Each structure stands twice: as structure tokens, then as C-alpha cells.
Image (tube, coloured by chain):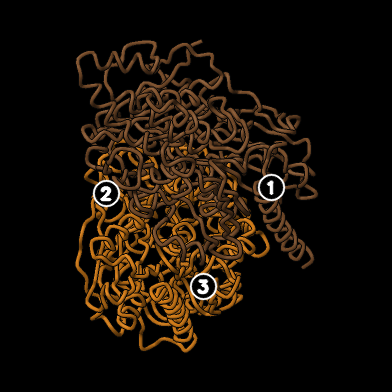
Chain colours: A orange, B brown
Amino acid sequence: MIYRLTKPVFHTLSFFLTIVSLLPSSPVSRRIPFPGKHPLLHKPPNTLLTNYYTYETRYFQQTLDHFSFNDRPKFPQRYLINTHHWSGPSRMGPIFLYCGNEGDIEWFAVNSGFVWELAPRFGAMVIFPEHRYYGKSMPYGSKDEAYKNASTLAHLTAGQALADYAVLITDLKTNLSAEASPVILFGGSYGGMLAAWMRLKYPHIAIGALASSAPVLQFEDIVPLETYYNIVSNDFRRESTSCFDTIKKSWDVISSVGRKVNGLDHLAKTFHLCGKLRSSDDLYNWLESAYSYLAMVDYPYPAESEMPLPAHPIKEVCKAIDDSADGTNVLDRIFKGVSVYYNYTGKADCFEVDEDLDGMDGWDWQACTEMVMPMSSDKNSSMFPEWAFNYTSYAEECLNEFGVTPRPTWITTEFGGHDYMSVLKTFGSNIIFSNGLLDPWSGGSVLENISDSVVALVTEKGAHHLDLRGATADDPDWLVAQRTSEAKLIKGWIDDYYTTKKAIFKL
Amino acid sequence: MIYRLTKPVFHTLSFFLTIVSLLPSSPVSRRIPFPGKHPLLHKPPNTLLTNYYTYETRYFQQTLDHFSFNDRPKFPQRYLINTHHWSGPSRMGPIFLYCGNEGDIEWFAVNSGFVWELAPRFGAMVIFPEHRYYGKSMPYGSKDEAYKNASTLAHLTAGQALADYAVLITDLKTNLSAEASPVILFGGSYGGMLAAWMRLKYPHIAIGALASSAPVLQFEDIVPLETYYNIVSNDFRRESTSCFDTIKKSWDVISSVGRKVNGLDHLAKTFHLCGKLRSSDDLYNWLESAYSYLAMVDYPYPAESEMPLPAHPIKEVCKAIDDSADGTNVLDRIFKGVSVYYNYTGKADCFEVDEDLDGMDGWDWQACTEMVMPMSSDKNSSMFPEWAFNYTSYAEECLNEFGVTPRPTWITTEFGGHDYMSVLKTFGSNIIFSNGLLDPWSGGSVLENISDSVVALVTEKGAHHLDLRGATADDPDWLVAQRTSEAKLIKGWIDDYYTTKKAIFKL
């Protein structure tokens, strides 16, 4: 079996699993696959309560450009809906809306079991609308047409996606005479950013938001640019300093081997690649992808949100790296380590680093327009090579790739970010920012309580999007406690809403 | 001297001074000139403190479409700026930003004296950015090009205008190293709506908003559709029931005269029109414009925000209608009445009801896209003919006129409106809704206090945009008191902001 892995695509970026190439000689960006791309994985994870994952699939004729009156054609927005447990409009039954991310919505539905499990307890309807330009929610009739050029991709933005959700839910509530039903937003990762932003921008539409692993501050210079890679690095160092050291050492070894005669062939052989290695950059990126992704999914139980992985996968990777006999060379150790990630099942004979050319990803476009999340790698604290974010070359690459110039300050202008403590304190309410500190994205999220109703729920040993996953028998106590706190806060929002509504009704 | 008056333009609408044709036989819409269109009037009004009205005119290269990444050309956005009294970035000197309305920004600057007069007391900078597609802020190089068709007009929306202000002020603050300076928004009429919406949508950019005469609730069925015309009618009845009765009677008389042989000529002669009258609709519209506008500018002192008018103009109009000798027929009385409005200086020999064909107004487009403000006229309570708002014909007319279909629920989806009491209570802060109850637009605004910091300041005898005008020697006590309250609230916002900032600084 050959795993199709990602060929480093220069000049593009991705979010959930984006990392930036760290080669000082080529300060470019690349993307790696983000969860949800593998059709094989479109099945419920190992949750306790899989019977909740039932839904009807519907389509809504959605406006392509909410913010202008161009006569562009509407597009079918897919959404998943389950009303089985809904207590109905007369009882103002709540609506749980998951803000779809940058991928097929079915993947997010099955990986967000918490939403499904919580709904019956609240008599809530569940709805998972898909993000425009992903999955089956394609403008212009097909992905080929939607992704044709900058002009057709123009309306793939976060602001338009939020407006989609606002319009869809308003229409749905009107059709069900459920105008009085409170809407609670959920979202993880980019979807969590959307949930938080939607609560801020559409408070008249949703009364609260659970924003899980949402790096809303990963823009401009709000958090130190080294944050992301420092967290990845610390996740490895925390398991084993020798593992951290070996990885840190490996980059120079790869470089020097790659420069030798037949060096690339040697690298290809060492890493069991199916084909030729065209440059050591490709290998860098392949390894970086693995480490970054491992930091995100360093879950306390076996899971396969992208790859099948053991519990505490970083511990396992480091074990493989460290356990190799003393004399084993660095590259062999590294290969043993990443094999835990790329080949946990042991079924792969070789690895493919070429990407399908038709696999252009919407997040590349988003990163090249508004989702500019600058990252650097610090010589001292990071296990990756030193690298400084260079906006000029970033922008040039976007221009080459898409013919588009990013607007790197637009997100903070539209949604805020600078001075977020006082802004959220005086203006925000009913938002939970939940994070696990192993997650490298947690450094760009809100990690302190801001007020009584803008709350940070942080777990030391949690990883990316973990709290939104369905309950499992292996859940540690701290995870159960985090979810209990979330449910309690959400109950508080809904209770407050009903109290206010009833007070008005009595007047 | 011939006043160029407005030819009724069927199928189009306008805001500040829009009224809807009330002829049951032709349920169409029209617009009448809104303040700021007459170049002659681009001079400061009779304020006490005209020396404050000095500013520098600058242009900012503005993004045409903030919400997509089309490669449309930027456009020069004009803004007026005065930094004379600004206490500067090191002292976090405030920035007063007036949200430009649907017209030449210079007109709004000179008619918003309150902003200029208040600035020195706060050490504030004043900035009046112009609304896109108005005045000199034209996309595509000229008004002719910008107003060419639906495609070029597509980006004339409230949401884009707010984004303009957000981007402009962010850029300006960055250039001045004034990131910490608090921004206070001002706006009257549509500009007041923008100010309130901007405070809700961009709380990270502006700490408070004075929204004067802002009918943010004049959408869908949030307020009764008869509200606007009932207020106009009550303004007349309040002065004199016989005046109200005469006007109410006049519509049938006009109809019946107009249907007679040579009836239109007779009407043209009675109303001293310069040219032929093509239909009695034109006369209806001409009269309705006058009455509606009189209700808006029923100021307690002589003013000329559009036409030169006496103090309490409705009282004067009714006096002219009532004082005519007993035997004088209805039409002569009506003519005497509206002459107070259209010819107060007595210099007009005749009146022109034809409009320049090139005078297409941006508000017509806005009304045909998102600013759908339904209005009806009630048989019993209104002095106008009975008329019910018909969305179907409204939409048809917009399609004919512009090739565009309105999105009548978009404004409330984007900015809220339904259930505004609880939404603003739980989510809004630092907004003043100021209104004068003589103003027919006051019925669509917020007239009750919502919370400690979302406050309604209502004056019984005030009219449209009155509190934002400059101080005059003739200001009644209640107007002085209203402005004092506004200044006090704004001072409170700024003081709170400084307290928070200093607390953070000390940490």
C-alpha cells in the first residue's frame, strides 16, 4: 500500500496543518494535507456514542457575494441537519450550529462528536453547514470551475462564509417559525475562529460560541512569531531532550548529505521513498509536516483523525528515535521516528511525496489573501532550522501562484485582535476559547479568562480540537472535566436567554 | 430665478428625503432632492462658531471590494481632516470620526457643527470621510463610469462603506502612531445608522457612537409601516387641524381637476410651474416632497439646510394655508402653503419639476438593493392618500430601473434589528440614539434607553439631525440640554477608556 503524501507546493500555504518551510535558503511556504481530505477517513472515530451521528443532507441556494450586488449565480451550500432531539419552536428549542471549516463538512461532523452528544441534553437541533468552496459547496457548478482563477476564487473569504451561516440560519428559523430559538455556535480550528468571529459580528443571530483551538490572534505581531514552532518543539522536548536534539541535528545532516554526489538518492533510500527525491527541501517539508501534525494530534488515546496513530504519538515517535541502537546514524533514527506517523499500520512499502496536481486547496488561496499568519523559527528555542518570516517574499509567491496580493491587516481590521483583552472585555460575551497546550495553535488563541462570560478553558495535556471530539472510554479526567465546564457554560447562556425572553413575554 | 426642482423619477427611491408616491393607481416610488445636492448651499449654516469649520482635504487609496479579492482598481476616497486641537498620540488624543452619508461630505461637515465644536473640548482630531460613490469619492474615475450600470454600482453598500471607514482610520492611526487613540463615531440620518452599525460591527475600532436621527429599525416589519407618514401628518395636525384637513382634502381635488379637459394646464398655472405638467402624479410628488421635508427640518430657528426656511416652518406653512380668505379654493391655499417651502425668499417666478437626467442618485441604487424601508399610508391617521407598501412592485421597479433584485432582509441579517431591545442590551454598549420626535424618521429609531450605555436621548420638539448642527443663538434650552447630555456621555466613554488603558499600563 502506498500512502499518497504531499509534495511540497512552493508558494502556497495551508492552515490546519500549515507549516512553513524552514530552509533559510528558500524562505517559502508550503502546505500539508489537513484532516478531512482522505475519503477513507470519512467514518466516525472511535467514540462511545456513534448512534448520534445521523443527519439529513440538504442544500441551500446561497448568495455568492453578500457584500455587493453583482449578479453572480447562487451556489448550492450543503448542510447536515438533525432535528430528532429538537424540542421545537414552541419551546424555543436551541439550535447548535457548527461553523464548517476548510474541508468536507462530513469529516468535521464525525470528528466533532461533542456537538452531537450534547444536543439531546439540550433538546437541540444540530446543523453543520459546509464552508463555501469546500466539499460539495462549490460555486460555478464544480470545483474545477470554482478554482479556475483568482476571479472565480475571489469570494472564498471568512467574511462571506460567516454571512452564509447567518443567512442560512435566518432562513431556516423563519421557515420553521423558530425565530425565538437560541443559536449556539461551535467550531474547532479555523471553524473555531469562525465561531468566535460570528459571535462578535452577528450577536443578534447567535447567543454564544464555543471556539475550540481557534488561533484568532495568529495575525500580524499579536503573538510572537516563534510561538507555533516553539510549541511543536517543546512537545518533543517534553517527551525527551535527546529526541529534540536528534531532530534539531538532523536538518544539517540532511543538507550535507543532499549536497553530496548521489546524496538525494541516498536520502530517498534512507526514507523509503517510492520515487526520486528532487531536492532536500521536499524531505524537509515531509518531516516538518509530520512533526507539526503530531503536535496537533498528540491525543491521549489512539485516533485516526488523519493517519491512524497510537495514543500519545509524540512519546512513541521519540521512543523510536531514542531507542535506536547507539551507533545508528541520525537519519535512520529520524526515519524510524516519522514511520510511527506515516506508517503506524506498517502497511506502506514506500512513501510518495508527489502531490496530485489537481489537489489545489482552498486554504492556499485563503492564506494568500487574508489568512496571513506569520511564523518564524527561533535558533535557540526551536528544533527546526532558524527562519524568519519574510512578508515580501510571501506576497511575491502569492502573486506568482494566484495573481493575488494578500491583505495581511484585513483580518484584524474586520474582526479585531490587537488589544483583544480590553475589546473582548468591554464588548464580547458568551464565548469559550478552549485550548490544549500541546497544540501548537494554542499559542495564537485566547488563554486567559477575559470576563465572566468570555472564558478560556485550557488543559495542559490537550491537543488540537480534542474537546470537540466525541467521548471515548479512554478520555482522561481532565478532558471530561473540560467538556463538563463547556456544557455548564452553554447551559448558563441558554438559561439566561430564556429568563430574558420570559421576562419580555410577561410584560 | 428658477429653482431646479425634482422631476418625479418613477421606480427609484431616496433616503434622507425619500417619500413614496401615494397614488393608489401607481404604487411607485420616487425620490426628492436630499440635503447636500445644491452647490449653492455649500456654505456654513448660521452657527455661532464658524471658525471651527476649517479642514484639510485629503484622499486615501481605498479598496473597492473589501469582502472579496477581485482585482478591481482602488478608488480615491476623500476625507476632511482637522488636527489643530488634537492632543496627539502620546496623550492618546481622541479621534472624532463622522460617518459620511449619501452625499458630498463637505455638506455634512458644515451641517454637523456639533462635532467641530466639541472637538477642542476633548483635544480631538476631526475626520469626515466621504461615503463611496458620493461627492468626489468615485470608483472607476468618474461618476459617469461609477454609475454606468449594476456591475459598476455593485459595491455601493453600507457594509463596504463601513469597511472603508475601518480601513481608513486604521491606516491613519498607524501612520500617526496613534493606535491607542480612542475613536468616537458621529453620524446623522443614514450616517447615524452607519455610526451605530459601525460601533456594533467594529467595536475594536471605535469605542462609542452618537447616532443622530438614525432609523435603524425602518426595515421589514420592525416598526409599523405607517409610522413615517403618521409622524409627518401629526406634525401638521399639531399646528392646525384645519391645515391637516385641507391637505388631506387636496389630493382628491388635484385628481379630479387633473382628469378634466385642460385640467393639467390649470394645475400648472395654479402652481406656477415653468413648464407643462405631464401628469398629476408629478404634482403629488412635488407636494409630498415638500411636506415630508418640512417635517424633517421643522427647526426652531431659521435655517437653510436645503431651502432657506423660517423658524418652525410647518407653523408658517399652515398659517399660509389657513390664513387664505375663507372662499379661496383648496388648490390656491395649498399653493400658498408650499410656497413657504419652495419660495421663502420670494425670488422664484415659477417652478421647474423636471429633473436633470444625469442626476441619478446613489441612494436610488441603495434603496433598490439593501435599503428597503417599507412604508405605507393609513387612511385614518395620515393626511396623505391611503397606500400600502407592495414589495412585489417595488422589486419589479428595481429590476426595470437597475437590473437588480433587492435583498430586503439583508440589512437585519447583517446588522440586526429584530429583537433589538435584548440584543443591544446584552451586546451593545456606548451608543447614543438621539432623536427629535417631529422628525418622521424618529419612528424608525431607538427611542427608549436600552441599558446604562445604550441610551436614547429624545426631544419632543426636535427634528432631523438637529442636535448635530452647530450651536446658534436661537437654540432652545431643550436642545442645549440634549447636546450637553451627549457631551457628558461621550466624556464618560473616553474617561472609561483612559482608566482601562492606564490600568493595563500599570500592570
Percent from the top left, x then y, of residue B301? 63, 35
Q: Quadrant of the C terminus of chain B?
A: bottom right
Percent from the top left, x then y, of residue B146? 42, 24
Residue under the image location 51 percent in, 56 percent down: B447
Element carrying mark 1: helix
Give the number of the disc on residue A435: 3
Query: Do the dots labelled 3 and 1 sit on one chain?
Result: no
Q: Between residues B207 and B285, which one lies in front from this camera angle? A: B285
Query: Which quarter of the picture shows residue A245?
Result: bottom right
Is A207 on the left or on the right of B49, as rendered?
left
Q: Which residue is mark 1?
A: B477
Element carrying mark 2: loop
Is B41 on the left or on the right of B335, as rendered?
right
Circle 3: residue type: Asn
Percent from the top left, x then y, of residue B246? 37, 34
Q: Between residues A94 and B278, which one lies in front from this camera angle? A: B278
Real-space CA distance between mark 3 and mark 1, rounded to the nearest whole angstrom = 56 Å
Residue under the image location 34 percent in, 49 percent down: B225
Q: Between residues A174 and A134, which one lies in front from this camera angle? A: A174
Earlier sequence position, callout 2 versus callout 3:
2
Element carrying mark 3: strand
Residue under the image location 44 percent in, 47 percent down: A12
Residue under the image location 42 percent in, 72 percent down: A504
Real-space CA distance between mark 1 and mark 2, rounded to the nearest whole angstrom = 61 Å
Q: Between residues B41 and B295, which one lies in front from this camera angle? A: B295
Q: Which residue is mark 2?
A: A138
Query: Which quarter of the picture shows residue A218?
Result: bottom right
